[in-house]
């Protein structure tokens, strides 16, 4: 294996020792007992045969047999105990691995979450193996450790035979035989290792070809799990086309699995052939030693059985070493994902607590471009405002409105310039405290398949009166009163079979209620009503404006009438604020605002 591949193997080993020392210890004990178990019987039977041959009495033979049986019993008992514990851990190791990756996702910088490459890493790392990457690594490491135990025990048995009583020609012959035996063991190992490497390379090609197919298969399973997509499929008569596409995927996956099975059978045939040839040579070697009078009848059994056991262990060892190369390739994505480092500076300054909720915000020569992009989305933006005002941000799609909010909430850090709150760079504030300043209803808001109360409180600990008040203010009071389970009602059926399906409009009101419940000094609505008609959107914004009271309310929309009630309107174009003022002031000026207003005026007849 290459230096880089060994690096990934070391990463996995360190990761296991850091997170799961108990599992590693169980694996080591299992390997020890599994490797030891067959040798108790092998050595015991050899001793027993020699005692019989030498005419030992029945009492001694019975004692010898009992020692063998008790040794085998206790060793097997321990092995089964460790095997059960190890197997149970492997059953949920993938879940634990997924938990670690989810923790990483929850704690990583937001910019990684919008990076397709990072999400591909996560998906690839999660889907690489049945047991999970660490579990599969431990399984092959267990095989390697067990093989090493067998090798050490066989060596301990065979070393005394090198010092037999033969002299002259017989001694030289034994040395040649031993040399030949070592060469045979080396050849078997190298042949099986190379066969395993070739097998793994071919299987990886099949696996990589199937990876995208499994993704598509999962997509179709998710697509057909709900009724929403079925409307379009039925109206457009796409059922047959969809069924045909799913059929192609299943047939290709089946063909790939068949190819993998054929490769596996070929590899096993090579392993079996080499093992049988090795066993023949071992029996020949032991027979010659017995013929030359160097070993007893009991030793014939011991040496032959020990060498056969060693050859089996050597076979497993070579295959597992080959799989380590595969593990290194699989571990690459997992290691790269878990190794992503924070790019954002983590501040420690607490946010000033103000009863009047008034904070001064300033953007000073701020420019920003998304990672991997060469073009700025925000260009040399300088502006300031005081929290406590009612503001609107308008402009065409792609003008930088939503990016402005992401920067203000510090989901991203600026590329150039600085954003300050009360004169302090926001990067210096404690992130958790800073995020408490904002209650945001994003354009692509998410309502989770948890209980209604948990969705609004964003926690399993809810202040029920406040949750009910927030839902009532958001227009869901009557709906809540009609729910048998009240705030314990699950949203949708994905998480709980007793859940209730809510409409898109009701979910939108839940998102608004969540923002009200948070009671943050700064409330932002980032085009969450884009699916509504202009007049309905205006009504939602106006109603929400009454709910927020004296807090800052920042509304983002590409439709102008919905934000006319705001005291201050920022007009964005190509990442810059090209106009600023009230609705009446901007409508009276030449510029983008009046151009957009005139283009949309047909929707606002009688509205201004």
Image (cartoon, rainbow, N blue to C red):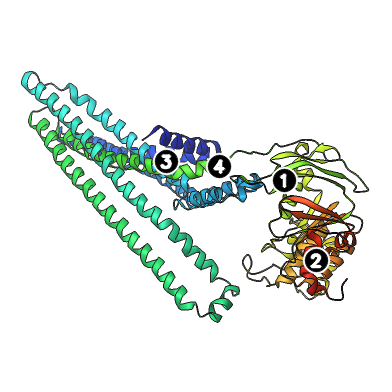
531 sits left or right of 13 in the view: right
Q: In this view, which residue lies farthest toward the front?
A: 590
Q: Earlier in the sequence, mark 4 or mark 2?
A: 4
Mark 1, other Cα within 10 Å: few <14 / some 14–19 / many ≥20? many
In this orientation, which residue lies closer to the viewer: 192 or 204? Answer: 204
Q: Earlier in the sequence, mark 1 or mark 3?
A: 3
**Residues at marks 1 and 3, CA–CA distance in whole angstroms:** 44 Å
**Residues at marks 4 and 2, CA–CA distance in whole angstroms:** 49 Å
Q: Earlier in the sequence, mark 3 or mark 4?
A: 3
Q: Which mark is residue 338?
A: 4
Provide the secondary structure element on which disc 3 rests: helix
Q: Which mark is residue 418?
A: none
Q: Which mark is residue 597?
A: 2
Q: Earlier in the sequence, mark 1 or mark 4?
A: 4
User: Are the residues at dot 1 and dot 3 in contact (C-beta closer than 8 Å)?
Assistant: no
User: Are the residues at dot 1 and dot 2 in contact (C-beta closer than 8 Å)?
Assistant: no
In this orientation, which residue lies closer to the viewer: 318 or 399? Answer: 399
Q: Which residue is mark 1?
A: 379
């Amino acid at each position: 294996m290459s230096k880089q591949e060994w690096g990934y193997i070391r990463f996995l080993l360190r990761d296991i020792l850091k997170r799961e020392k108990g599992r590693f210890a169980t694996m080591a004990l299992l390997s020890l007992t599994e490797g030891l178990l067959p040798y108790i019987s092998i050595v015991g039977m050899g001793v027993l045969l020699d005692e019989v041959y030498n005419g030992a009495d029945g009492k001694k033979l019975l004692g010898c047999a009992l020692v063998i049986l008790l040794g085998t019993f206790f060793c097997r008992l321990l092995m089964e105990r460790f095997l059960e514990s190890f197997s149970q851990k492997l059953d949920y190791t993938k879940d634990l691995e997924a938990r670690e990756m989810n923790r990483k996702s929850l704690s990583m910088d937001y910019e990684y979450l919008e990076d397709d490459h990072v999400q591909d890493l996560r998906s690839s790392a999660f889907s690489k193996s049945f047991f999970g990457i660490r579990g599969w690594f431990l399984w092959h490491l267990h095989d390697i450790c067990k093989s090493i135990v067998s090798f050490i025990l066989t060596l301990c048995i065979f070393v005394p035979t090198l010092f037999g009583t033969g002299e002259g020609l017989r001694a030289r012959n034994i040395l040649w035989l031993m040399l030949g035996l070592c060469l045979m063991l080396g050849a078997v190992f190298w042949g099986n290792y190379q066969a395993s490497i070739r097998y793994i390379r071919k299987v990886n090609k099949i696996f990589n070809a199937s990876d995208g197919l499994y993704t598509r298969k999962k997509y179709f399973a998710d697509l057909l799990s709900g009724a929403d997509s079925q409307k379009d499929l039925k109206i457009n008569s796409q059922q047959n086309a969809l069924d045909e596409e799913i059929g192609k995927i299943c047939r290709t996956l089946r063909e790939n699995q068949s190819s993998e099975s054929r490769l596996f059978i070929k590899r096993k045939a090579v392993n079996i052939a080499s093992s049988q040839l090795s066993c023949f040579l071992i029996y020949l070697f032991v027979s010659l030693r017995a013929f030359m009078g160097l070993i007893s009848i009991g030793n014939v059994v011991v040496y032959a059985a020990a060498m056969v056991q060693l050859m089996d262990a050597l076979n497993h060892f070579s295959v597992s070493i080959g799989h380590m190369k595969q593990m290194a390739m699989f571990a690459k994505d997992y290691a790269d994902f878990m190794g992503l480092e924070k790019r954002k500076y983590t501040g420690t300054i607490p946010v000033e607590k103000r009863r009047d909720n008034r904070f001064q915000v300033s953007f000073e020569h701020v420019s920003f471009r998304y990672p991997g992009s060469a073009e700025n989305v925000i260009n040399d933006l300088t502006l300031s405002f005081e929290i406590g005002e009612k503001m609107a941000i308008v402009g065409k799609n792609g003008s930088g409105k939503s990016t402005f909010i992401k920067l203000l909430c510090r989901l991203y850090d600026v590329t150039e310039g600085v954003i300050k709150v009360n004169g302090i760079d926001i990067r210096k504030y404690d992130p958790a405290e800073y995020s408490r300043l904002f209650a945001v209803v994003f354009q692509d808001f998410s309502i989770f398949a948890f209980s209604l109360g948990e969705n609004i409180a964003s926690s399993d600990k809810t202040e029920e009166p406040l949750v009910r008040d927030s839902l009532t203010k958001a227009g869901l009071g009557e709906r809540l009163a009609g729910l048998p389970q009240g705030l314990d009602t699950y949203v949708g059926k994905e998480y709980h079979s007793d859940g209730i399906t809510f409409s898109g409009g009701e979910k939108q009101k839940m998102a608004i209620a969540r923002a009200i419940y948070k009671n943050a000094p700064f409330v932002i609505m980032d085009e969450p009503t884009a699916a509504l008609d202009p007049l309905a959107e205006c009504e939602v914004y106006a109603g929400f404006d009454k709910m927020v009271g004296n807090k800052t309310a920042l509304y983002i929309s590409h439709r102008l009438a919905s934000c006319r009630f705001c005291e201050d309107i920022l007009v964005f174009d190509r990442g810059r604020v090209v106009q600023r003022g009230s609705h009446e002031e901007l409508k009276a000026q030449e510029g983008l605002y009046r151009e957009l207003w005139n283009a949309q005026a047909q929707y606002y007849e009688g509205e201004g």
